[in-house]
């Protein structure tokens, strides 16, 4: 019986010895493949995370010589269509109505902006600006719980259009600062039939307050910076077509946060764009309305020279008011032309 037992051949013995080794190699290859896939996935995820995170933008321009950059102001000075002056008697006196906020109201003396414009142009100038007011309204319709909307551009313009100053006078008398009531008294003396120019200038207040720069769905939304401008300008043009309207942009300014820290207006987005974004939108609004635009942001007081002309982060010192007055005086004295649109070329 023992002789009947099958004796393993040499090949069988070799196969039995090699089999465990081959099996081990097979398992190891799977592990290596899985590990490689896992490693590739980790590397890909890391690179995607790094790409999404981006690279911080260095906004420190203190070491940059900005004199090498040539920035063109966005000025757009339009001539008056002579047909709009038909039937209007020229009294020989240039009369300017100033609407806006702090650039005019910070100083109402002989060294103030309105007085400087008078001195440099010989014009009669009415300063009807209100401190800390804005181009935009807070509410789309009048809200009696927020009476200060009366001092914003749309409502001030409506006072002139309706020749009605009772409501704004009452609200101004409730203000602790007498300049509000004084401004209303000046408004009452303005004869709009004699006004030649309406000069509108608001500083960075709308930007500081986080007011929307515009409303793409409603260009005339008075709660947006450019919507308030558009509505007021169009109402002025429709009521007094013979009046030239000049929109003066804010100058460069800094934004002060609630902790008192200052931030560059050119790079700080308050949620509705940087300050220069507001200037570009304002330029677009002036173009849409067909009125002149004076770019103070790049053409008067800018990021390079603001320390010479600002008394703090946004208000002007005497040199700043002089520079603004020189800017508008040059246009009033030299660039108030007329054209005859009906003449065939």
Image (tube, rainbow, N blue to C red):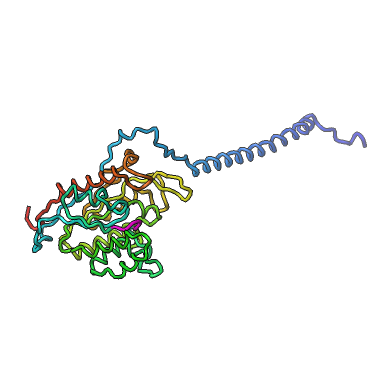
The image shows residue 178 at horizontal and vertical percentages of: 33, 60
The answer to whether residue 120 is left or right of residue 102 is left
Q: Which residue lies at the image location 12% right of the left edge and 56% below the top edge?
A: 93
Seen as rendered, the residue at the extreme left is 344
The image shows residue 150 at horizontal and vertical percentages of: 33, 65
Q: Quadrant of residue 307?
A: top left
The answer to whether residue 183 is left or right of residue 47 is left
Location of residue 6 with respect to 113 vertically, above or below: above
The image shows residue 207 at horizontal and vertical percentages of: 37, 53
- Residue 139 is at least partly visible in this image: yes
The answer to whether residue 268 is left or right of residue 104 is right
Q: Which residue lies at the image location 26% right of the left edge and 63% below the top edge?
A: 185
The answer to whether residue 102 is left or right of residue 258 is left
* Secondary structure mostly seen in the magenta stretch: loop
Location of residue 53 with respect to 126 vertically, above or below: above
- Residue 290 is at least partly visible in this image: no
The magenta region covers: 129-133
Q: Quadrant of residue 61?
A: top left
Q: Which residue lies at the image location 65% right of the left edge and 36% below the top edge?
A: 32
Tell me the quarter of the image containing the N terminus. top right
Q: Which residue lies at the image location 27% right of the left edge and 51% below the top edge?
A: 109
């Amino acid at each position: 019986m023992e002789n009947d037992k099958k004796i393993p051949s040499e090949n069988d013995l070799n196969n039995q010895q090699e089999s465990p080794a081959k099996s081990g190699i097979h398992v190891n290859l799977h592990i290596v493949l899985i590990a490689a896939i896992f490693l590739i996935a980790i590397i890909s995820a890391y690179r995607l995370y790094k790409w999404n995170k981006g690279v911080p933008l260095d906004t420190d321009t203190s070491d940059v010589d900005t004199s090498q950059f040539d920035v063109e102001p966005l000025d757009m000075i339009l001539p008056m269509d002579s047909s709009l002056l038909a039937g209007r008697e020229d009294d020989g006196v240039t009369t300017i109505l100033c609407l806006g906020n702090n650039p005019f109201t910070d100083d109402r003396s002989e060294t103030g902006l309105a007085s400087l414009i008078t001195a440099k142009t010989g014009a009669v100038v009415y300063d009807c600006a209100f401190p800390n007011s804005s181009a935009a309204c807070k509410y789309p319709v009048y809200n009696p719980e927020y009476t200060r909307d009366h001092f914003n551009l749309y409502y001030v313009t409506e006072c002139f259009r309706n020749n009605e100053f009772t409501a704004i006078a009452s609200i101004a008398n409730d203000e602790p600062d007498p300049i509000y009531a004084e401004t209303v008294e000046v408004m009452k003396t303005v004869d709009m039939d004699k006004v030649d120019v309406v000069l509108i200038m608001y500083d960075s207040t709308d930007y500081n307050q986080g007011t929307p720069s515009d409303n793409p769905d409603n260009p005339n939304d008075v709660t947006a910076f450019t919507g308030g401008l558009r509505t007021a300008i169009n109402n002025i043009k429709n009521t007094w077509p013979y009046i030239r309207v000049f929109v003066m942009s804010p100058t460069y300014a800094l934004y002060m946060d609630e902790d008192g820290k200052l931030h560059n207006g050119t790079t700080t987005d308050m949620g509705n764009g940087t300050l220069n974004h507001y200037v570009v939108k304002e330029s677009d609004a002036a173009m849409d309305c067909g009125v002149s635009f004076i770019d103070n942001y790049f053409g008067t007081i800018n990021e390079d020279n603001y320390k010479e002309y600002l008394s703090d982060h946004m208000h002007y010192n005497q040199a700043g008011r002089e520079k603004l007055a020189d800017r508008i005086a040059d246009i009033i004295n030299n660039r108030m032309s007329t054209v005859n649109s009906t003449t065939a070329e």
